Amino acid sequence: MRQTCLKALFHQLLVLGCVLGFSRLSCVGDAASLPRPKMTFLDNGQVRIGMDLTLGGAVTFISSQDHPGNIINSADLGRQIQMSHYSGPWPFEVGNKKPHPSWAGLGWNPIQTGDFHGNPSQVVEQRNNGKEIYIKCIPMQWPLENVPGDCLFETWTTLEGPVIHMRFRCTNQREDKTQYRPCPQELPAVYTISKLSRLMAYTGDRPFTRGELTHVTNDWRKPWPWTRFIASEGWAALVDDNSWGLGVFKADGGEFHGGIYGTGRSEDPKHSSTAYVAPIHVEMFDHNIVYEHRTEFMVGKLEDIRQRFNRMAAKTPPVWRFQHDRQHWTLRGATDQGFPLDGEWRITLGDRKPRLESGIRFWRAEDARSMKMRLAYRGQVTSVRVFWRRLSDEGFDDRRSLTVPLNADGQMHTYQVDFAGSPDYKGLLSGLAIETVAEPQPGAVLTLRTIEFSPGTLK
């Protein structure tokens, strides 16, 4: 008998622009129909992690020296710790196979464990030398029945004390070369036992100063059950009432989605209730992209998790070098050369005003009073506007922007942006955007190589 389909309540939100994140509370059949687990483990005496080779190598087991029980929820194929990526078209169809109507709004969505109908992903290569686990799998398209993903997933896992280091790679092999709109990616999706019901993070504007943590709450009964939040120290943790649990750290990010699902508070990894958290980047997911990222996990007390991740965090203003990829920037209202970037990001303007927007990164205004942009422009527009966003801002605002005159000769120039004179350039900042000031001329080309703040320290 199939479970109640909660994810069906969320696909409408994804249809509206793929901007809110995802729930993977799936509707697959009884767990008894799944293959018998085939586990591979790493154990250094402080932490133990296991991947199921019959389920795409997704993480199905984590325990620690002090808490030997498994804290990863595997009630169905949609949970675990697993890779999950998103792009168009909406709906995504393969031949005569169409997505279940509940999931049509997800579009193209390969996931590591298996599909909505209970067909598991296939591991095609795996190694475990006792120090590192490597796994390569062919994921399944979640919304469709028994359709392998047109991509490869790879993971590399090592241990360092109580910290789990994981590197992830998705290699796309899509025949559809359409450049679809940016979508948020789960990096990765993390589901734990529901006993770890308290989602904790620092969400204030003075990171790394031992400020009070926030208990992020949610209402799982709403059509959108998870809470989106910005963690300005780059980490979030799911912990129990004794402040012990699992922390998740993203060195180059800050957006997370998460919460608790169900009324239960159970230690059973197969219980229907669960806790969830996922670091998020919004990305343009090209047909041929090789998308790599790193995420760290730690089991332990909340204060220890915070101290360890704060030591690992970068505290200098960001630098973006567009040598091979977009550096978590997205593009709307224009097109670019696609992946890879070949040393620079070339953007061709169309009949709409373009918007270039960075991913979420943090720096203090007083530590980065100026910025250099290395770019070339060929066209009739003679200036761009640079916007900055504060932690508390929902979006970008003309009051927090500066106009930068451009040389339109098509040659590479360095432009100095001086923020010191703007009274609205202050506090903790979390991102940039760039727009042309006038309406664009179709065919004009903007080429970016670097964006770099002056050196400083995030205190």
Image (cartoon, helix red, strand yellow):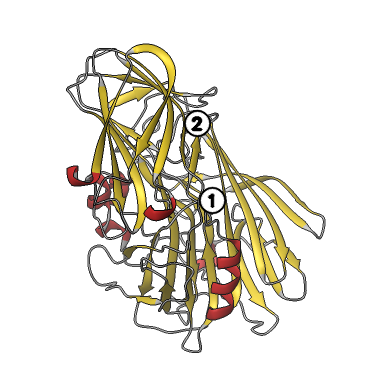
Earlier in the chain: of badge 1 and badge 2, it is: 1
For the residue marked with disc 2, what is the amino acid? Answer: Phe
Residue 414 placement, left or right of 164 = left
Between 320 and 277, which is closer to the camera in this rendering? 320
**Quick one: which residue is furthest to the front in this view?**
421
Between 168 and 341, which is closer to the camera in this rendering? 341
For the residue marked with disc 1, what is the amino acid? Answer: Gln
Name the image quarter holding residue 128: bottom right
Question: From the viewer's perspective, is residue 64 above or below residue 434?
Answer: below
Kindly identify which residue carries mark 1: 112
Residue beneath the point at 51% across and 40% down: 148
Residue 50 in view here: yes
Rendering coords of residue 307 (x, y %): 57, 73
Residue 19 in view here: no
Circle 2 sits in a helix, a strand or a loop, which is it? loop
Rendering coords of residue 249 (x, y %): 53, 62
- Closer to us: mark 1 or mark 2? 2
Circle 1 sits in a helix, a strand or a loop, which is it? loop
Q: Which mark is residue 322?
A: 2
Rendering coords of residue 100 (x, y %): 32, 47
Residue beneath the point at 81% across and 60% down: 130
Residue beneath the point at 43% across and 84% down: 265
Rendering coords of residue 69 (x, y %): 62, 81
Residue 53 placement, left or right of 419 = right
Name the image quarter holding residue 2: bottom left
Between 260 and 36, which is closer to the camera in this rendering? 260
Q: Which mark is residue 264?
A: none
